[in-house]
Image (cartoon, coloured by chain):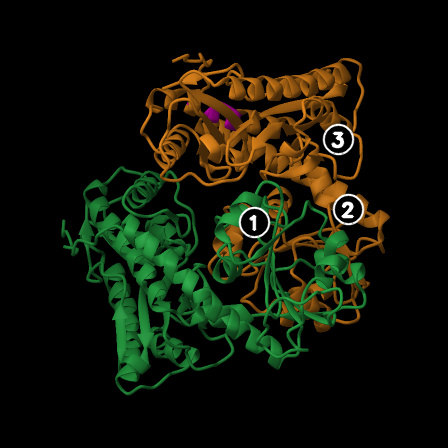
Chain colours: A green, B orange
Amino acid sequence: MTLPVIAAVAAPTRDDLERWAEADREARPRRLARLRERMATEQVDGYFGVRRENTRYLTGFVLAEGEEKVAGESGRFFVSADEVVVLADSRYRVQAEEECPEARVEAVYGNLASRWPELLASLRPVSANGSNGSARSDSSAGPRARRIAVEAAFVSHGAWLRLAEAEPRVELVPVEGWVEELRAIKEPDEIERIHAACGVADAALARLLPSIRPGVTEAELALQLEWEMRTNGAEALAFDVACLSGPRAALPHGSPGARQVTPGEVLLFDFGAQVAGYRSDMTRTLFVGEPTPRDAAIYELVASAQQAALEALSRAVASGDRPTNRSIDSTARDLIVAAGHDEHFGHGLGHGIGLATHEAPALGRTAPEAPLPAPTVFSVEPGVYLDRETGVRIEDLVLFDPDARRFERLTSFPREITVVG
Amino acid sequence: MTLPVIAAVAAPTRDDLERWAEADREARPRRLARLRERMATEQVDGYFGVRRENTRYLTGFVLAEGEEKVAGESGRFFVSADEVVVLADSRYRVQAEEECPEARVEAVYGNLASRWPELLASLRPVSANGSNGSARSDSSAGPRARRIAVEAAFVSHGAWLRLAEAEPRVELVPVEGWVEELRAIKEPDEIERIHAACGVADAALARLLPSIRPGVTEAELALQLEWEMRTNGAEALAFDVACLSGPRAALPHGSPGARQVTPGEVLLFDFGAQVAGYRSDMTRTLFVGEPTPRDAAIYELVASAQQAALEALSRAVASGDRPTNRSIDSTARDLIVAAGHDEHFGHGLGHGIGLATHEAPALGRTAPEAPLPAPTVFSVEPGVYLDRETGVRIEDLVLFDPDARRFERLTSFPREITVVG
């Protein structure tokens, strides 16, 4: 068995967590100012947010992944000229007051539509005053909000209909991506947290290797890898661990099951950690015993495709260029297509990552073409999948920052062929 | 320390899992027939579903909790007169074909709007033919779908706008709760799975008790409780474990942290397991050392409120009655209000549970009043929370089946005051 050597990565300390929390507190006014500039440009008076990650980014209020499904309207928020208003039902009120000292916390109890007119009336419009709200005005006397931007990709159509009916004098403007565009550009403390999450994941896989032997099941290895992350610095997983053996590796999003690790097959791990809200994402395809010629050839092809994309990004950074999301996808994809595997690489090359596992930018054939944002962090993850036979994917996260001439791989587990078992 | 004795509950076996999978396969045609009756009554030609749980219930395609966020349009589905159509991108195609042998699997790649007209054109309408579709007709020659029901509580407003624009000749009808109403009425094999999940959770808490001692942190206990469940029959958690000590127990949805277990305080656990897709949910408030008079009095009040609701439900079942969701909430709440704690019980008395942790019926003051569905499973979970001081909640799941004269508690961990540490 070839045991990769990983540089020891220290798990985040309590000091780290406090420093990052402080960085967020300092960053939030800058983030809000950028959103208010956009609001002024687009002539909306207020912004109504519903996406969990956007709530955390702009207000500091934390809902765990999936918690939004049972939190009712808690965590939804308004941004006006001079205020942030966070909604919280009785279960979340104390938490909201503690996490959002700068915000006004308003109680809602599943009755958002009935309170909607009053909440809108309490907002001081951005567009009537430019983007720099000063002291809060007496809302009953001031100008009324007439156009409210609403996160259309995250508010349900049913909720939209109820809100529109509740206050027909206010126009709801469907907007998508306004906060996501801000989030795509990463601050230094955000990059540090993603890097820390990568370190937790790197170390966990290295510790798992001795347990990988014929007969152990996918589900057992997935659970152990999760345990390694969560007891060594991860506050949560970024997503459920994928551990897929042999033909099941051809399921790019399959779930680990009772299938046993078998010599002569691949073993694919796709996993990530979460540290202080920020995620990592990495895929490694290991070999149980000596690789078959077919699997080794596919591995080398995927590795070369990934390497080509990384080199193109590195050259762009060296020259201060910003290639497009589609061009980087093509750089990797062309090699896979040339090898006759066009149909076996069905997904995009990569995706941004941060508070969400998948966020902007999207690298792929179908995404609208645009220069990469910067500085940003995204995955580079080509794959080749032969249905019901085998699959190989290699995924790393990279920091792309041409202005600072920085291009770094944030995941550090070796990418060479690794034989286990 | 008072160690409750729990009857040993066998973790689900592979035979159980196969039996439940078979039961689902047999149940799906009946579930679909009920949906098609509703579609015919409401004169819609097709049904477009997007909610993860509804996909599993009607088609068999499984996405893990939260996986829908990265699955694109995979798992979205249509029901027409004679077909189920499941959408899957390349990552999920093989899985969809395996899990949904009765369905037509259609490939989408983030391009649903562009394929929408063609997909609608391929559906044979329900309303033109009554609810009993026979063999699939040649869709190009048959009648066209004119009205499509869309799950408005789960499709985003942004997606709605794109779909409406893509095929303006087809009316999109926003519907909510059609499948959820079916899911509220539980089949025997669904009840069995919820009960199995309760057994996993009961046993896990019993095994955790010796580890609860002053100095251990909330986060450590939460992780150990999770581990106990996931290595003894739970395929996943129903939701993140809440473990909250002392004043933090007043946060009904707080997250476990670095706070240490301290003598003289309460320790609240809210947790659940998932078995073959179905969830449990239980809350126990334990005492670390002897309870203070204040905490003991609150505990007895909450326990008596829960007992009053359970007895009212038991009487209803004995007489074959179906009380309303609001009346049962009031039965418990009146006792808490009479004790002067009206403001300290801010949430509803309970919620249905099944494939989702929170589903119909909702028991509370704000839910529209309606007789309870039956047979059904829901939580009974009164609580009293003193901000920044202490909190007590006691939560059990019950099976309510007046037609069969069955009323059973599915969670069996003792509800008496339990002193640990």
Q: Find disc 1 in the rendering and name its residue.
A: A68
Kind of residue sitting beneath label 2:
Arg
Asked whether residue B394 is drawn in magenta, I would say no
Can residue A303 be seen by looking at this rendering?
Answer: yes
The region drawn magenta spans B196-203
Q: Find disc 3 in the rendering and name its residue.
A: B325
In the rendered view, tell whether residue B156 sits above or below residue B352: below
Q: CA separation, marks 1 and 3?
A: 24 Å
Which secondary structure type mostly characterizes the magenta part of the structure?
helix
Question: Splitting the image into 4 quarters, where does residue B140 fall?
Answer: bottom right
Q: Is residue A20 left or right of residue B342?
A: left
In the rendered view, tell whether residue B312 sits above or below residue A154: above
Can residue A346 be seen by looking at this rendering?
Answer: no
Question: Splitting the image into 4 quarters, where does residue A227 fall?
Answer: top left
Q: Position of residue A160 (x, y in %)?
A: 72, 60
Of the two numbered discs 1 and 2 in the rendering, the one whose residue sits closer to the viewer: 1
The residue marked by circle 2 belongs to what chain?
B
Towards the viewer: A325 or B127: A325
Q: Position of residue A77 (x, y in %)?
A: 60, 58
The kind of secondary structure element at disc 2 is helix
Q: Are marks 1 and 3 on the same chain?
A: no
Q: Is residue B397 left or right of residue B222?
A: right
How many numbered marks does the figure carry?
A: 3
Q: Residues within 10 Å of mark 1 (few under 14, many from 20)?
A: some
